[in-house]
Amino acid sequence: MTRIDRYMLLQFLTQFGFFALVLVSVYWINRAVRLFEQLIQDGQTALVVLEFTALTLPLVISLVLPVAAFAATVYGTNRFASESELTVMKAVGLSPWRLARAPLAFGLIVALMVAALAHGLVPAARARLADRQADIAENVTASFLRAGSFQYPGDGVTLFIGSIAPDGRLLDLFLEDARSPLRQIAYTAEEAMMLRTDSGPRLVMLRGMVQTLETVAGELPRLSTTRFSDLTYDIGSMLSVRSKPGRDLRDYSTWRLMNPDPALLEATGATPARARAEGHERLAQPLLAPVGALLGFAMLLLGGYSRFGVWRQVIWAIVALLVVHMLSTTAASQAAKAPERWPLLYLPAVVGAAMTLAALWLAARTRRIRPPARGAAP
């Protein structure tokens, strides 16, 4: 790599750090605010909120880096053009193909960053986030274990606890399930205990009674009572707590997605073709970084020098990037509907590369000098 390549690469990396920081901050703060509101409403502490927002950061960075690479290349190339550095480079005989070496190296560096995130940090963070969400879901019931007041943890559900013993026993429990207007059930118990199981929280009630009020059209309401010495109730379903969360394909490593095993398929409920399509989507994601960098550079080489700047080329570069990202979104949705269409996931990178080559070819095409007209003075 020559000195001029190192100079251009250093300028791109400097601008890339700035744009990446700004875009990640804006995107992450937007997501963190919504997550903060949700967790605070569930009664979680600030440490839990900080942990959840930190676990979402790798995903945000992986989505933002290709856009930051494009912005850095466009800004850097615009600066080279405005300060006549690009003109000097062309004057010494450097063709657009030769000048594209620096943005290509820059795009490959960003692609390695995206690949490390997509194949390593993002799946690990998502798996950890899924585990923590499952823990939070099972601990939601603990926020309703307050003595001496009526609580309404769900629509049509009323809970009252007389007192809580030092050993954790719930004394004088009242629980009403009126979610169905035709069948209302009230549970009373002298003692109760909250137990955690693999399938979710369970409420074990001791020495109590169940009163069921059923209403049938055209008949009088009928009340039936049943006494029990012990009764186990799935309180997790009543409180809308997901007892056994299903895994997401994005929580697993790329190697397991490309070679799905029965445990993965059972946990996610996906087919082998769908798992492989998710793996191909990860493999295609880093390709957008060099495509975006080269596309921004090549588009700004089109056209000659103008004292009004290269704003037209900037607009064309943004339009080209939008086309690539629209194709990426469409390909992802098509692969989600029909996993056998996973080759479409690589189409945005191919189209972006084709537009880049076309722009470089147009920029490198030499202009023909018209011969002087006959009779004109030499």
Image (cartoon, rainbow, N blue to C red):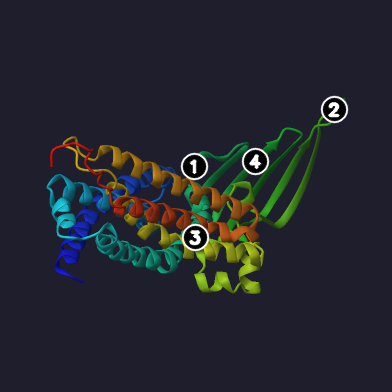
Q: Which residue is mark 1?
A: 148
> Please, what is the three-letter code of the amino acid marked with disc 1?
Gly
Q: Badge 4 is on which residue? A: 176
Instruction: Report the side of 176 relative to 125 (left or right).
Output: right
Residue at point 25% right, 46% down?
369
Residue 40 visible, this orientation? no
Image spot of residue 202 (x, y percent): 62, 58
356 in relation to 262, above or below: above
Q: Which mark is residue 217?
A: 2
Q: Which mark is residue 130?
A: 3
Tag 1's secondary structure? loop
- Closer to us: mark 3 or mark 2? 3
Q: Earlier in the sequence, mark 2 or mark 1?
A: 1
In the structure shown, which secondary structural element does the residue marked by tag 3 occupy?
Answer: helix
Query: Quadrant of residue 62 in the image?
Result: bottom left
Residue at mark 4 to residue at mark 1: CA–CA distance: 16 Å
Classify residue 52 as left or right of residue 283: left
The amino acid sitting under disc 3 is Ala
26 w.r.t. 191: above or below:
above
Tell me the crowding category of disc 2: few under 14, some 14 to 19, or many 20 or more residues within 10 angstroms, Cα based: few
Inter-mark Cα distance, 2 to 1: 37 Å
